[in-house]
Image (cartoon, helix red, strand yellow):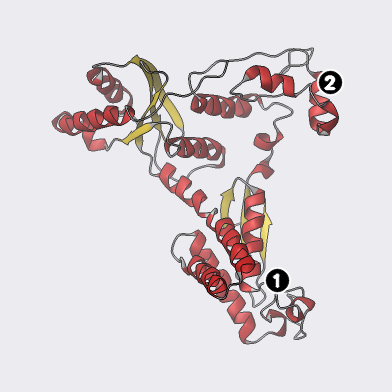
Amino acid sequence: MKDSQGQTLYVGKAKNLKNRVQSYFRNSTNHSPKIKKLVKHLRDFDYIQTDTEFEAFMLECQLIKSIKPLYNRMMKSPQSFIYISIGLIGNHRKIDIVFEPNENDGKVYLGPFTSRRNVESAIRALKDCFKLNCSNPNGTNSACLSYSLGSCLGRCLGGPAEQEYNDILDRFIGFLKGTDMSILEDMNQMMLNASENFEFEAASAYRDHIQAVGSLINKEKVLEFTEENHNIAAIERLSDSTFKLFLIKRTDILFSKSYAVGNIEEKIKTDILAHFKNNEAHAAGEISRHEIDAAHIIYRYLHSGSCSYLIIPENWLVSENHAALDQALNNLLNDLQHIEPPIHHE
């Protein structure tokens, strides 16, 4: 979307372009101030048609980062990524949400996460389940209001309760690092106990808390998968007679091409060897903040059921192991037959 000077104000994607554009002009009284201001300055727009929604997501991500449109605040702002901060120095630990880690302040930082809402829900769930809602966390040895209400385990009184509080935070750190699942196991037991005691409302609350805390693990899966720097061949059906191949490395689409259904294994194999063999431009290592959005899009796509994908080990790219690649491609194309082509919106 552009203003009268041709400056890009906003970049977005839509399955149904007509409905999406019309939505900015319908029911305008219900629009946020941001949308009202955007519509006021809007004079023109361009569109780019893609074959798949995955490509649209990736293109949207790329354009927002390169153009930095005024109204795409969520992707542009550094506050779109957040961290969980837990102090490890002293007896009175504190769990916080921050936007920038500081490596020299004696705290452990977990993240980055892309959804503040999910992180806030998870921390609230952790505090509710393990009674960490202390309203006097500075340890003055006097009971806080939350303690009298049963939502604080007694950290404010010092002594063993404070050590228990710290132990729970240590386990939470282990949980987010993937080394200690006891936090989730205890929460599941709390839900089971409530259900067995016919406390169904409490059991339902525990279930929601488990989902909130468990959602944070997905971030670790995304980053770990991306950092492993796989060679990925993904195939998606476009119609009954065509499909599209994507060759992906880390957070980049190296190559994409549409094919007619038929005997084309050798063509795909040639493309794979041409783009993955001796590719040194995408080194393995820790994922950077500017890669996070693309990493989430790719991971979500591969696990969405919209495509079939194959991870290609480096040793399959050498000539003596091409038989393994041939067999894997044959299986990949057979899997494609079980995926329905998308419904196109006019």
- Residue at the extreme right of the image, as rendered: 29
Q: Is residue 105 visible?
A: no
Which residue does the image show at 56% across and 52% down from the upper left?
111
Distance from label 1 to label 2 (Cα)?
45 Å
Question: Element under label 2?
Answer: helix
Label for residue 133?
Answer: 1
The quarter of the image holding the N terminus is top right
Residue farthest to the left, as pictured: 320
Q: Which disc number belongs to residue 40?
A: 2
Q: Residues within 10 Å of mark 2 (few under 14, many from 20)?
A: few
Q: Residue at x 60, y 61 (%)?
A: 209
Left or right placement of residue 145 versus residue 298 in this view:
right
Decide if residue 167 is on the left or right side of residue 222.
Answer: right
Image spot of residue 207 (x, y percent): 57, 61
Q: Position of residue 198 (x, y in %)?
A: 58, 72
Q: Is residue 49 visible?
A: yes
Q: Could you say where residue 96 lies in the image, as x and y percent from the top left?
A: 67, 61
Q: Quadrant of residue 137?
A: bottom right
Type of amino acid at the residue the image marks with label 2:
Lys
What amino acid is at disc 1? Asn
Q: Quadrant of the C terminus?
A: top right
Residue at image x 29%, y 35%?
Answer: 312
Where disc 1 sits, the SS reads loop
Q: Quick one: 185 or 83, which is closer to the camera?
A: 185
Q: Residues within 10 Å of mark 1 (few under 14, many from 20)?
A: many
Q: In which quarter of the view is residue 40 placed?
A: top right
**Residue 212 on image: x %, y %:** 59, 56
